[in-house]
Amino acid sequence: MYGAYEVSEHILTRVLEYGILNAGGEEMASIENTENITPTKSIRITEKSIARNSYETAIVYDKENNELFRVSQGDASAVELTQKQWAQAYGMTLTHNHPFDLTMERYGFENTSAFSSKDILRGMQYGIAEMRMVIGNERYSFCWVTPNYEKTIQFIEGLQKIEASASAVITDTKEAVDKAVNISINNQTTENKNRAYNAILEHYSTVVTETNKINQFIADNQNAGYIFKKEVL
Amino acid sequence: MSKLEKMIKEATKPNANGTVSFGEPALKNTDISGLVKKFEESQSVPKIKFRKAI
């Protein structure tokens, strides 16, 4: 089935071997027919406890949902796992939070986020059975089921393009905020104040829109051989 | 090296200390809290002009 690509076959087979679900064949099982991927209560409670943190924590659970280890070191928007820890995470559930933005919430926007293409590839390489992510009131789940080589490449390339395009848009709105804020500080008129305020709202609104686009793309490409779910935390 | 393998190699490139990062959000440049703070502080604190004591 995966004979056309020797090295990748090894990678994909490892994921298949330890995948928590097996749809069978190259056809994706419909989401409705899959097993429940909502975790046990203890994992849900733990996920809720980290969902509003401004720094990241990653927690690995074994197949019986016992916590194996957790990591919080790294910069604010990533953690660092040693090769030993990645080996321990093989075939297990890896959950983590994305940094919560209190300022965004204060301006009336729900925090939202999306898995990066890099993390999806890491999950594949290290045989993570299920990769989970929480932020604010949202929980996301991603697991490879029956990866299709060609469609996986198309999916990752497409995701990388959307990430780059979204990132460029966000950079623009961020620069607009920077400019508007500086003008409002140097010349404190009501008009300038409103412009700065609106630039802030525009930025946060764009973050939500662009993040939703990424999540929609992930949701639309499950024929690459994975299951993606979004739930209310 | 296959295309997928190249992608994976790039994504799992070790840090200087040998670890491999995990958890970066798809969008990393969203935080404007510093700018918002600067804006709010400029609005809430009136500029006071001090006169030289005569």
Image: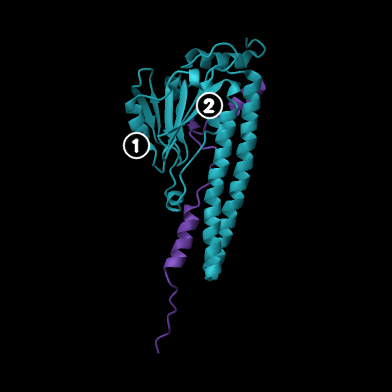
Chain colours: A cyan, B purple
Q: Is residue B8 above or below residue A51?
A: above
Front position among marks 1 and 2: 1
Q: Which residue is mark 2?
A: A122
Residue at the image position 64 percent from the left and 41 percent from the top = A165
Residue A107 can be seen in this image: yes
Q: Which amino acid, mark 2?
A: Arg
The residue nearer to you, when weighing A118 against B13, is A118
Residue at the image position 49 percent from the left and 28 percent from the top = A229
Which chain is mark 2 on? A
At label 1, counting other C-alpha atoms closer than 10 Å, the crowd grade (few under 14, some 14-19, many 20 or more) is: few
Q: Is residue A112 above or below residue A82?
A: below
Q: Which residue is mark 1?
A: A49
Outermost residue, bottom side: B54
Q: Is residue B28 above or below residue B3?
A: below
For marks 1 and 2 on the same chain, the one whose residue lies earlier in the sequence:
1
Residue at the image position 35 percent from the left and 28 percent from the top = A43
Separation of residues labelled 1 and 2 (CA atoms): 25 Å
Q: Which amino acid, mark 1?
A: Ser
Where residue A15 appears, x then y in whole percent? 52, 17
